[in-house]
Image (tube, rainbow, N blue to C red):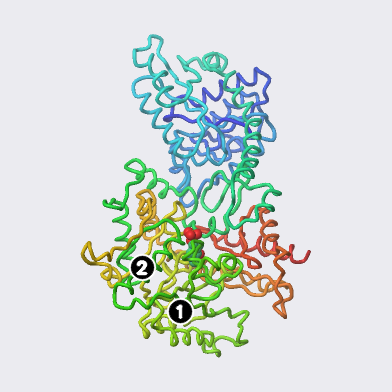
Amino acid sequence: MNGLFVTGTDTEVGKTAVAGALAWAFRRRGIDVGVMKPVATGCRREEGGLVSDDARRLLEAAQAADPLDLVSPYRFAPPVAPLVALQQGSSISLDRIEEAFRALSDRHEILLVEGIGGLLVPLDAEATVADLARRLRLPLLIVARAGLGTINQTLLTLEAARSAGLEVLGVVLNRRPPRPSLAERTNPQVIESRGKVPILGVIPDLSAPSPGRLAAHLKAGEILDRLRSRPVEERRRIRRLARLDRRRIWHPFTQMADWAKGEPLVVESGEGVHLTDTKGRRYLDGVSSLWVNLHGHANRDLDAALRGQAGRIAHSTLLGAANVPSIELAEELARIAPPGLTRTFYSDSGSTAVEIALKMAFQYWRQNGSPRRRRFLHFVNAYHGDTIGSVSVGGIDLFHRTYRPLLFKGFKVPSPYCYRCPLKLAYPSCGIACLKPFEKAVRAHRREIAAVVVEPALQGAAGVITQPKGWLKRVERVCRKNGLLLIADEVAVGFGRTGRMFACEGEKVRPDFLCVAKGLSGGYLPLAATLTTERIYRGFLGSHGSLRTFFHGHSYTGNPLACAVALENLRIFRRERVLERLKPKVRLFAEELKRFSRLPHVGEVRQRGLIAGIELVKEKRRKAPYRWEEKIGIRVCQFLRGRGILLRPLGNVIVLMPPLAISADQIRLLCREACAAIEAVTRG
Ligand SMILES: *Cc1c(COP(=O)(O)O)cnc(C)c1O
């Protein structure tokens, strides 16, 4: 799709005149040019409906004869902003505009799309003109009025365009008076140098409305050349990126020999729960970009928080100084965390958050009278990250086996996996008998154990293996009775994923350490925190010479950009009542998930909040798993990719973990498509 989005620094700056003149000039050069004025206000009522004079003028200049419903899918009579013209409760669908745009693109070589007002004009309660330009993936031509104030207006528009991720082709200045003042004469150069943008025309007089006359003042040839070379350059760029990815990048948890054979999906932009790749294909992000995103991509408020902080400072260290956002965030975390967790230690990933909790627990006992407590008790199928310390307390053989010689030894005990209960028992009549080995290990080693490390509610990376009700509470009780510290790893389940802010709340568990990362920054930036109690904190106090200091820290600890975004993430929870609005979504999700259980190759469907794991089995009655080589999960996800849905499996488990911002319709779509994909792939 090729085209240009004509926008202005203001309304009434001559966008339609410039777009018309360009259409005329292109047409004269033999280009089949189409026009679009997707949202038109101030329309006249005629027989057959509302008619936009602007759209008519554009069509005339382009000598195009497309139906008005494609050229202007949204037409309003009042000459006011679309947001105001819209009837209460209705909205403007970018999908619908994009559809019309695609239809027109099929008919023409180049499309000129005229925006409405300036970039930040709201189209409806959600979208702005900039969002529309972003969606159509078109470069901008900015029309500005020549005269006093032009520089400021134009530079502001350029800034808005660039911070919305838009490409600017150039600027056209309008209505330069016959005897320009010094300002008007120098404006173009200042805009070019300060805005780093070419001036593609200076039009003296708009009152002579013939497009041909106006076109004489535009660098139409240059604009056309740029537009015509774009598709070629674009294809070259896409191929180059794919090639370089294969040549330069080593992807995590990926067999690169397989990767090199395939075509990489290169994500270029996002919007809400959708991702767009370099080829312009849109995907529903069904795993929240690996469990991190909460409120959608390119979230307006998070973007603004990020930019606002970038305008102040991007980074300063917490070693020897404090910074504003990290203080505010720590206060907010203490407010929302389970009671007693009042101290925050920052780092940058879930792995380091866990690593820090381990080191703190270890050192705490060392300098508080129990130096023999230096081992960790952890669970089979646990995943706590990929650094050596966090792998040492992990329990997924597939990931961890190789590194065993590097790891420190702890006590690994079974965790619940009700679907494949090794004791062949059933909940609740089992009385959670799988806790016995845990209790036994504690009895035997209580004086050697520093802490118990656990993922509350479910073991995510092992395949969303959910814990039976009461399991976590009993783990906590055993810890309390035996004086063990409890480390809760809420890196995956924290921040609303399970329907509660933290999964610990589900069983009113109060850990000594709470590790958070992934969703902490709303899925924007690498940020993690290890929260702990005053008791642990005080265990590190002493004189300088006592060496009770916690000797740990990262260069980017407490990064202000990440903390500012995280703070806004938490504000969104409050302002938009995210947890409350999640409840009906979770119910709908549960309802929609029922369809999976009926499939012949679905063994179990496990759900907590907006997290679901669908375990595929080769043979349902015997619960026989697919073999690793069969890549069943990978194949289902590949199938879904072709249907515009992005998922990442865990072995034979299909994981659905959409952003909390997902809508009811999108939940239905996600489940319907995933179900169809499983059916299609397992049948084959
Ligand atoms: C993802 C994850 C981690 C590791 O977090 P990273 O930011 O990837 O290092 C730790 N624990 C759990 C439960 C996780 O899901």
Q: Whole-Å distance between the Cαs marked 1 and 2?
A: 22 Å
Q: Quadrant of residue 401?
A: bottom right
Q: What element carries label 2?
A: helix
Callout 1 crowding tier (Cα within 10 Å): few <14, some 14–19, many ≥20: many
Q: Name the residue located 45 percent from the left edge and 33 percent from the top edge.
A: 117
Residue 680 image point, x, y percent: 74, 63
Q: Residue 472 carries which label?
A: 1
- Circle 2 is placed at which residue position? 360
Seen in the picture, residue 543 relative to 123 is either above or below; the reply is below
Q: In this view, does 500 lie to the left or right of 602?
A: left
Please indicate, yes or no, whether residue 142 appears anywhere in the rendered image: yes
Q: Name the N-terminal-most of marks 1 and 2.
A: 2
Please indicate, yes or no, whether residue 61 appears anywhere in the rendered image: no
User: Which amino acid type is marked by label 2?
Assistant: Met
Q: Which residue lies furthest to the left in this view?
A: 543
Give the quarter of the figure containing the C terminus.
Answer: bottom right
